[in-house]
């Protein structure tokens, strides 16, 4: 069975999209007043333990099968041999497993990004920023702050526009939290001093790992890579590990 990305049955006109998005923003403005905790609702990963376990078993089974036959992956390993001193420590099936995880990670990133487009299409983020002329929670005008987008719930609903500082508070990045997170202690000052966003850290890591798919300007890309390099040096984490840290903490 071939995987087919879910698509909405509803086709909305530009005007319908704008009206629906405005109603959505109005709804979350009321939520920010009546029940602000709902601005950042997260389902524990344990809720999907059974599914995750099944996926893990499937990956192990498929990669072991690949390791026992001639195919594009095994040829790739032959074309990229290990240094002699590492060869006995990294069996072929583990190398294939690692390559599979990297491929799946890229696929997951693309599929999660596609969930934003389910209702509003490929320009949903631009629409959010265009319609969000101020921070939805603080009311700070866009020209007086850096607007970032935030997902209240990762269930397919679109993001909402928030001022960068408001976004940080909602994500739980208070000074107390930053003191508890060793990685955050190293990276947050770099983020603040450069007036950068977590999205830029993610983009910088992806660019340096050659897995980015972006149409951002050269200046933004250069700044993002600088942010990623400085963060890696300060925290001691690799670019892969930084991406995982951003993902685990739902920062971008």
Image (spheres, grey):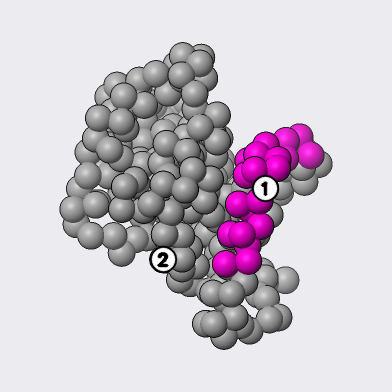
How far across and down, in percent of the image, does residue 177 sit? 52, 19
Quadrant housing the N terminus: bottom right
Picture disc at residue 31: 1
Could you tell whether 144 is left or right of 241 in the image? left
Report helix, strand or loop for mark 1.
helix
Any magenta on residue 35?
Answer: yes
**Residue 33 visible (yes or no):** yes
Local crowd at mark 2 within 10 Å, few (<14), some, or many (≥20)? Answer: few
Picture disc at residue 130: 2
Q: Could you tell me which residue is drawn at 46 percent across and 60 percent down?
A: 132
| Magenta highlight range | 22-47
Q: Could you tell me which residue is drawn at 61 percent across and 59 percent down?
A: 26
Any magenta on residue 213?
Answer: no
**The one of 212 and 57 positioned closer to us in this rendering:** 212
How far across and down, in percent of the image, does residue 98 sit? 51, 41
Quarter location, residue 165: top left
**The one of 159 and 133 positioned closer to us in this rendering:** 133
| Magenta part, dominant SS | helix
**Residue 85 visible (yes or no):** no
**The one of 84 and 58 positioned closer to us in this rendering:** 58
């Amino acid at each position: 069975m071939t995987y087919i990305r879910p698509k909405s049955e509803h086709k909305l006109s530009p005007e319908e999209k704008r009206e629906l998005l405005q109603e959505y923003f109005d709804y979350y403005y009321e939520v920010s007043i009546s029940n602000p905790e709902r601005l950042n609702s997260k389902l524990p990963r344990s809720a999907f333990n059974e599914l995750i376990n099944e996926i893990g078993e499937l990956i192990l089974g498929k990669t072991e099968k690949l390791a026992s036959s001639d195919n594009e992956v095994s040829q790739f390993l032959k074309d990229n041999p290990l240094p002699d001193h590492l060869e006995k420590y990294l069996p072929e099936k583990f190398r294939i497993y690692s390559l599979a995880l990297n491929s799946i990670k890229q696929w997951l990133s693309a599929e999660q990004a596609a969930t934003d487009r389910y209702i509003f299409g490929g320009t949903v983020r631009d629409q959010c920023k265009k319609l969000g002329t101020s921070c939805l929670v603080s009311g700070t005008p866009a020209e007086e702050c850096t607007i970032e987008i935030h997902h209240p719930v990762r269930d397919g609903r679109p993001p909402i526009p928030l001022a960068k500082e408001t976004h940080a508070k909602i994500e739980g990045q208070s000074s107390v939290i930053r003191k508890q997170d060793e990685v955050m202690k190293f990276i947050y000052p770099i983020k603040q001093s450069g007036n950068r966003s977590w999205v830029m850290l993610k983009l910088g890591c992806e660019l340096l790992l050659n897995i980015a798919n972006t149409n951002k300007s050269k200046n933004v890309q250069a700044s993002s890579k600088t942010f990623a390099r400085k963060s890696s040096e300060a925290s001691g984490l690799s670019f892969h590990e930084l991406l995982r840290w951003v993902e685990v903490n739902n920062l971008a």
